[in-house]
Image (cartoon, rainbow, N blue to C red):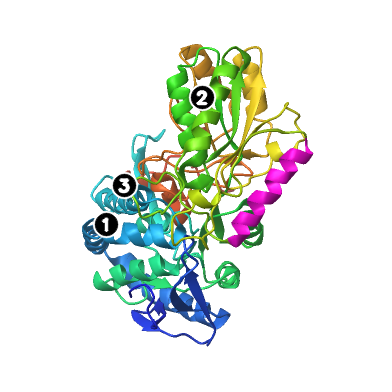
C-alpha cells in the first residue's frame, strides 16, 4: 500500500487479506500535515472471533514444529525489516510523527528483536535441577500457551509489535495482533512481511481497529495470554479482566512519571545531555520519557540555565528531515492533554521557565501549518507529594524541575513519590550515590550517567507499581507465553522419596 491510496487497508487472518465482517472504515492521518495517508477497515467483534478461531486451528501444527523450523519463518521477516529499514522508517515518521532517525531506529529495534528471538531457537532451553535422590533426574520444560493476543501502541508501531510477537511465535504460540488505530499503515506493512515469509495460515493474524477490537481480544476466552503495551488506565483494565479467569494471563507494560536525578557530584555536561534526550526525544511521547528533573541545590542554578537555553532552542520541524529534533505530537487529543497539564502546573504554583506550547508561526515548517505542533514546556516547582503535575503522566514535552537539598536519600524519596515505577536515571560521579539509587529507586529500567530512554532488545523492558505487571519483552516474555512443567524421572527400579518420606506400603498382613 502507498500513502494517499484510495485502496482501503484490510485485515489479515487465516493466511488471507479480508475486508472482514463490517463496513466501517477509519483513516490514518499524518500528524505533521493532517493529510489522510490511507483508509482502513475497522474490525468488528465477529472479525476478532474469526481471527482467534484461525489462530486456534493453526496452533497444534505450529507447536509441533521444531523451534528452529519456526524461527526460519522469522528469519525471512528479519531480512525484510533490515532491507526495508529506510522505507519503513520514513513511514513510521510520517504516520506517528517521530523524527526520521527515530523512525529508522524503530525498525532497527524490530529486526534486532527478531534476530534475538530467532537466534534463541538454537540456544539451550530448559533447566536441569539437582535432585535429592541420586537416581532421579529433575528438569524443567516449557510448552506454548496457545493463542496470544497482542495489543500495541502507536509510538513504536514496528518495534513493540515485534517485542511481543517474535518471541511468542518462536516459542510455538499463534498470534492475533491489533495495531494502534493511529498507525494502521505500519501494521499493514508488517502483515505483508509475514505474508511474504510464508508463515502457515492462521499462525499470524491481524485485525485493524480501535479499543473495541482490543477489548474483544481480551474478552475472548480462547485467547490464552494477552500482551499489552499502552496506557496505565487501559492496561490495568486488561489485567483486571484477565485476572479472574482461570487458565488465562496478561502481561502489561504501561506508562510512567519518570525522572532524572542530578546529584551534587554530577558531570553537568552529561546531566544536560541526558535530560534533554530523556525529556524531548519523540516529543516526550515515550513511556520512558522524563517529565521530572530532580536536581541538587548545589548545581541547580547552572543546570536550570543550561537546560532552559536548550529547551528554548531545540528544533521542532518536519519529522522526515534529518535536522529535526522534535516532530509533532500524534493527534489533537495529545495537543489538548498537553495544554491541560500545562495549565494544571500553573494552577498548582509552577514558575514557568519555557512556554512553547503554541509555537510561533516561523517555528512551524512551511506547508505544515495544520500539523499537531507543540514545543517544550518547562517549569520549576516546590516539591509536594500530592501535586498532580508531579504524579500524573502527561506523555508530552512537559517537564518539571525540582530542587532538592541533602543526600541521595532525599532525591530517591522524591523520585519514588509517584504511583508509577517504569524508568529513571541518576547522574553522579560518586558510585555510592549510584548504588543507593540502584538499590532503592522504584523502577524497572534504570540508567546511570545516561538518558532514561534507551533500550536494548536483550534486556527486559517493564516496570513496577502502576507501570507494569510483567515485561512483554525479550527473555522475560517467555514467562508470559509458555507454561513451565517441572519434571522428575526415576532411573531406579525402586521408588525413593525426597525429604525422608517413606515409600513403604504398609498393610495389616
Q: Position of residue 30 (x, y in %)?
A: 46, 65
- Disc 2 to disc 1, C-alpha distance: 34 Å
Mark 2 sits on what residue? 306
Q: Residues within 10 Å of mark 2 (few under 14, many from 20)?
A: few
Q: Position of residue 236 (x, y in %)?
A: 64, 54
Query: Mark 3 and mark 1: span between their CA atoms?
Result: 35 Å
With 222 as the anchor, is 205 left or right in this view?
left
- Check disc 3: other Cα within 10 Å, few if <14, some if 14-19, many if 20+: few
Look at mark 1 in the image and give the residue it sits on: 86
Name the dominant secondary structure of the magenta segment. Answer: helix
Q: Secondary structure at mark 3?
A: loop
Figure check: 155 above or below 354: below
Q: Is residue 115 left or right of residue 330?
A: left
**221 on left or right of 392:** left
Name the secondary structure under disc 2.
helix
Pinpoint residue 223: horizontal percent, then vertical percent. 51, 68
Residue 143 seen from this side:
yes
Asked whether the beta carbons under mark 3 and mark 1 sit within 8 Å of each other, the answer is no
Residue identified by numbered label 3: 125
Q: Residue at x 63, y 63 (%)?
A: 245
The foreground one among 357 and 215 is 357
Toward the viewer: 181 or 191?
A: 181
Q: Quadrant for residue 476, please give it.
A: top left
**Where residue 310 is drawn, which disc sits there?**
none
- Occupied quadrant, residue 383: top right
Q: Which mark is first along the chain, 1 or 3?
A: 1
Q: Residue furthest front?
A: 362
Q: Secondary structure at mark 1?
A: helix
> 289 left or right of 455?
right
Amino acid at each position: 500500500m502507498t500513502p494517499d491510496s484510495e485502496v482501503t487497508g484490510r485485515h489479515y487472518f487465516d493466511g488471507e487479506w479480508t475486508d472482514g465482517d463490517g463496513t466501517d472504515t477509519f483513516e490514518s492521518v499524518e500528524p505533521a500535515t493532517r493529510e489522510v495517508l490511507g483508509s482502513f477497515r475497522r474490525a468488528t467483534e465477529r472479525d476478532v472471533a474469526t481471527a482467534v478461531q484461525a489462530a486456534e486451528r493453526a496452533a497444534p501444527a505450529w507447536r509441533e514444529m521444531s523451534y528452529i523450523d519456526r524461527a526460519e519463518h522469522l528469519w525471512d521477516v528479519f531480512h525484510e525489516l533490515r532491507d526495508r529499514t529506510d522505507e519503513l522508517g520514513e513511514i513510521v515518521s510520517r504516520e506517528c510523527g517521530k523524527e526520521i532517525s527515530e523512525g529508522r531506529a524503530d525498525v532497527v529495534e524490530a529486526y534486532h528483536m527478531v534476530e534475538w528471538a530467532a537466534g534463541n531457537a538454537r540456544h539451550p532451553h530448559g533447566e536441569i535441577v539437582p535432585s535429592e535422590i541420586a537416581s532421579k533426574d529433575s528438569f524443567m520444560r516449557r510448552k506454548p500457551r496457545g493463542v496470544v493476543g497482542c495489543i500495541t501502541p502507536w509510538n513504536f508501531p514496528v518495534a513493540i509489535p515485534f517485542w511481543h510477537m517474535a518471541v511468542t511465535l518462536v516459542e510455538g504460540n499463534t498470534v492475533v495482533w491489533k495495531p494502534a488505530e493511529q498507525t494502521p499503515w505500519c501494521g499493514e506493512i508488517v502483515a505483508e512481511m509475514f505474508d511474504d515469509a510464508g508463515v502457515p495460515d492462521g499462525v499470524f493474524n491481524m485485525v485493524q481497529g480501535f479499543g473495541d477490537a482490543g477489548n474483544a481480544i481480551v474478552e475472548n476466552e480462547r485467547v490464552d495470554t494477552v500482551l499489552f503495551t499502552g496506557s496505565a488506565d487501559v492496561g490495568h483494565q486488561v489485567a483486571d479482566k484477565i485476572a479472574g479467569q482461570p487458565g488465562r494471563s496478561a502481561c502489561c507494560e504501561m506508562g510512567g512519571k519518570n525522572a532524572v536525578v542530578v546529584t551534587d557530584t554530577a558531570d553537568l555536561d552529561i546531566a544536560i545531555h541526558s535530560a534533554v534526550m530523556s525529556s524531548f526525544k519523540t516529543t516526550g511521547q515515550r513511556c520512558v520519557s522524563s517529565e521530572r528533573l530532580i536536581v541538587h541545590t548545589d548545581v541547580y542554578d547552572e543546570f536550570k540555565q543550561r537546560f532552559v537555553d536548550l529547551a528554548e532552542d531545540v528544533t521542532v520541524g518536519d519529522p522526515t528531515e534529518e535536522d529535526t529534533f522534535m516532530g509533532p505530537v500524534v493527534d489533537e487529543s495529545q495537543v489538548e492533554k498537553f495544554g491541560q497539564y500545562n495549565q494544571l502546573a500553573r494552577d498548582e504554583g509552577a514558575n514557568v521557565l519555557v512556554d512553547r506550547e503554541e509555537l510561533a508561526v516561523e517555528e512551524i515548517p512551511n506547508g505544515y501549518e495544520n500539523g499537531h505542533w507543540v514545543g517544550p514546556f518547562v517549569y520549576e516547582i516546590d516539591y509536594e507529594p500530592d501535586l498532580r503535575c508531579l504524579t500524573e503522566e502527561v506523555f508530552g514535552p512537559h517537564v518539571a524541575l525540582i530542587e532538592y537539598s541533602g543526600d541521595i536519600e532525599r532525591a530517591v524519596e522524591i523520585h519514588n513519590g509517584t504511583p508509577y515505577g517504569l524508568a529513571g536515571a541518576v547522574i553522579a560521579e560518586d558510585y555510592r550515590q549510584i548504588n543507593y539509587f540502584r538499590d532503592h529507586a522504584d523502577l524497572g529500567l534504570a540508567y546511570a550517567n545516561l538518558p532514561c530512554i534507551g533500550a536494548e532488545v536483550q534486556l527486559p523492558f517493564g516496570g513496577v507499581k502502576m507501570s507494569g505487571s510483567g515485561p512483554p519483552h525479550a527473555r522475560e516474555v517467555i514467562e508470559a507465553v509458555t507454561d513451565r512443567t517441572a519434571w522428575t524421572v526415576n532411573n531406579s527400579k525402586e521408588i525413593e522419596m525426597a525429604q525422608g518420606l517413606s515409600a513403604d506400603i504398609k498393610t495389616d498382613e
